[in-house]
Image (tube, grey):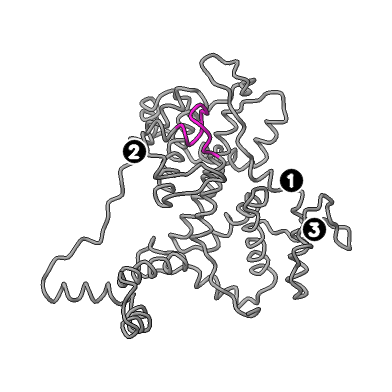
Amino acid sequence: MSFVESAFGFLHLQMQVLRLLYRTHFGDKTQLTSLSRWVALLDRNTKKLWNAQGKGHIKEFNSCLDFFETVLDGYLLAVLSTAYGCKTLDAFIGRFGECTKEMLDKIAGTLTKFELVDVNRESDRRDTAHDNLILFLTHGLILRNFSQAMKSGDPERAFASMGFFTFWFQGSSQWQYSEELLRITACLRKVWSPELVAFFKENCLINLSGKRSGWVPDDELNERIVKEVKTMKRNNSSSPAADHHWRHTLTLQTLLFPEAKERMAYECQAFISDYHSTPVESSRDIRAIAATLLNDGICRPQPNRDGSGEQPKQPKQREVRDLFVEGQKAKDLTRRISNLRDSLAFGAPASPDDLVDDIEVEVDEDGTDIIEALDLCW
């Protein structure tokens, strides 16, 4: 089994990243940039989205992702309006034609300064709500880049986001995903042959429809097949012969059934259904979020709005975790990287005792810091 490489689960990685971001940004209704506030504002049913008990878990992935994307669009609209000096959406609509590449590049440059919030928090000019807004935008855009990369069939673009996910997970209770991301990154960059790397990139995403944005991860296709197979066998008390036919004949033909269904409908001149779906219109929700942010003035930093609750009509704000900075500062990071490096290089699997926390920074033989030597961030 040491020579067998299974398909990488992009879909399940996306699920865990979304879970981590909900745990980070859900908060409560009194927090000006929390997901909980927008759930209440947009009258969404929390029980169908997110269970905040314990470490928290997602109840319905697609609904959670759609809601997160809606909030992110609202934040982006508010930031653009503020960048052009507009205090209302109506004023921004009148100036929308003035948007330039230079302005967009300036906003993007601010959001890619990943140490910005950490620097702000160590200064005396704190603005907790504004810093939380920046973190949500940064986290959300990196996740969106990953999602769009999968849909467009671009694994290299997805790898760019995976480098950040590695650090996000490292500073969280989901650190085992960080280890797996480090392993796959090391394999792609140093361990695997060029032929195996090319094979991985060509087969980690699949397109069955031929549409430009119709790519899906291997594990998502597998989930769809399993769902179809389960619908074919609703009675678990079937005879051994029927069970054998279901397992070894029908399940192997799952991908052929949709084509057979369409062909039979064509031959019979019967209309069965429209395979196109219309996405739910979210523009009203996006505008509501953006308008609320503009009214609160969160997109423009205000010195000394530090979350103390001293501002009138403004509850005390709690700092959202800076996942990227915390991941880099995680005390056990270098120990885990070095043991993973050794296990990959020498074929000796790391034991559980080797993966215990260690606050000391390990140094390579030439005196170079392990993190710098591996250069694992894409």
On residue 283, the disc is 2
Do the residues bearing badges 1 and 3 touch, measured as CB atoms within 8 Å?
no
Which callout, 1 or 2, points to the residue nearer the camera? 1
Relative to 9, residue 96 above or below: above
Residue that sits furthest to the top in the current view: 312
* Residue 90 magenta-highlighted: no
Q: Residue, x 69% and y 59% (percent of image)?
A: 376
- Structural crowding at the residue carrying mark 1, measured as other residues with C-alpha within 10 Å and reported as few (<14), some (14–19) or many (≥20): some
Q: Residue 334, located in which quarter of the rendered image?
A: bottom right
Q: Is residue 372 visible?
A: no
Report the side of 111 relative to 247 (left or right). Answer: right
Q: Secondary structure at mark 3?
A: helix
* Residue 32 magenta-highlighted: yes
What's the CA distance linking mark 1 and mark 3?
14 Å
Figure disc tally: 3
Pick whichever of labels 1 and 2 is earlier in the sequence. 2
- Structural crowding at the residue carrying mark 3, measured as other residues with C-alpha within 10 Å and reported as few (<14), some (14–19) or many (≥20): some
Question: What is the x, y in percent for residue 18?
Answer: 51, 49
Relative to 3, residue 304 above or below: above
Q: Is residue 138 visible?
A: yes
Pick whichever of labels 3 and 2 is earlier in the sequence. 2
Q: Amino acid at mark 3?
A: Ile
Q: Which residue is mark 3?
A: 370
Q: Quick one: quadrant of the N terminus?
A: bottom right
Which callout, 1 or 3, points to the residue nearer the camera? 1
Q: Quick one: quadrant of the C terminus?
A: bottom right
Magenta stretch, residue numbers: 25-37
- Structural crowding at the residue carrying mark 2, measured as other residues with C-alpha within 10 Å and reported as few (<14), some (14–19) or many (≥20): few
What's the CA distance linking mark 1 and mark 2?
39 Å
Q: Amino acid at mark 1?
A: Lys
Q: Which residue is mark 1?
A: 329
Q: Residue, x 42% and y 45% (percent of image)?
A: 49
